[in-house]
Image (cartoon, rainbow, N blue to C red):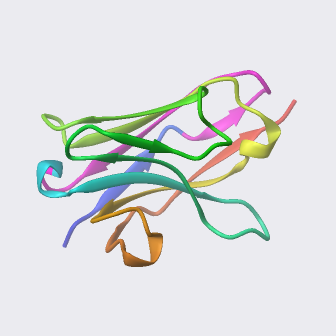
Amino acid sequence: QVQLVESGGGLVQPGGSLRLSCAASISIVSIYTMGWYRQAPGKQRELVAGIFISGNTNYADSVKGRFTISRDNAKNTVHLQMNTLKPEDTAVYYCAGGYGLDPSRLPFWGQGTQVTVSS
């Protein structure tokens, strides 16, 4: 059973930065796509950023230029560097893995980590 464990969430002021990490229990070179998703209260879960085994990336328009996703295959870890955070970035952030970016088709999910952007 594949386990994904997120860390790095917390409370940060607007304009601040956070770095989320997702540690996998298996080699992530066997996982075609790794992604970060978020869900705010009363809203649907949405893609934040995805990274493919090729290294190609995909970002939501709302985070382009502010967030960076990366994968460290040697450490089986995926990171999400979040800069210039805004209150609207407040959500539970989930790490996921599988094939493609459609969250309904991804078999591996972490438990989520809370990110709160507030002064």
Residues 59 and 22: in front is: 59
Residue at 27% from the left image edge and 63% from the top image edge: 3
Residue at 31% from the left image edge and 61% from the top image edge: 97
Name which quarter of the figure residue 89 lies in: top right
Residue at 45% from the left image edge and 78% from the top image edge: 104
Farthest residue in the bottom direction? Answer: 104
5 lies left or right of 74: right
Quadrant where the C terminus is found in the figure: top right
Residues 32 and 110: in front is: 32
Q: Position of residue 99 (x, y in %)?
A: 27, 65
Quadrant where the N terminus is found in the figure: bottom left
Residue at 31% from the left image edge and 74% from the top image edge: 107
Q: Position of residue 100 (x, y in %)?
A: 33, 63
11 part of magenta stretch: yes
> What is the number of callouts on the image?
0
**Quick check: 18 above or below 43?**
above
31 part of magenta stretch: no
Q: Position of residue 12 (x, y in %)?
A: 72, 30
64 lies left or right of 8: right
Name which quarter of the figure residue 108 lies in: bottom left
Q: Position of residue 112 (x, y in %)?
A: 51, 58
**Quick check: 73 above or below 32?**
above
116 lies left or right of 87: left
Residue numbers of the magenta segment: 9-27
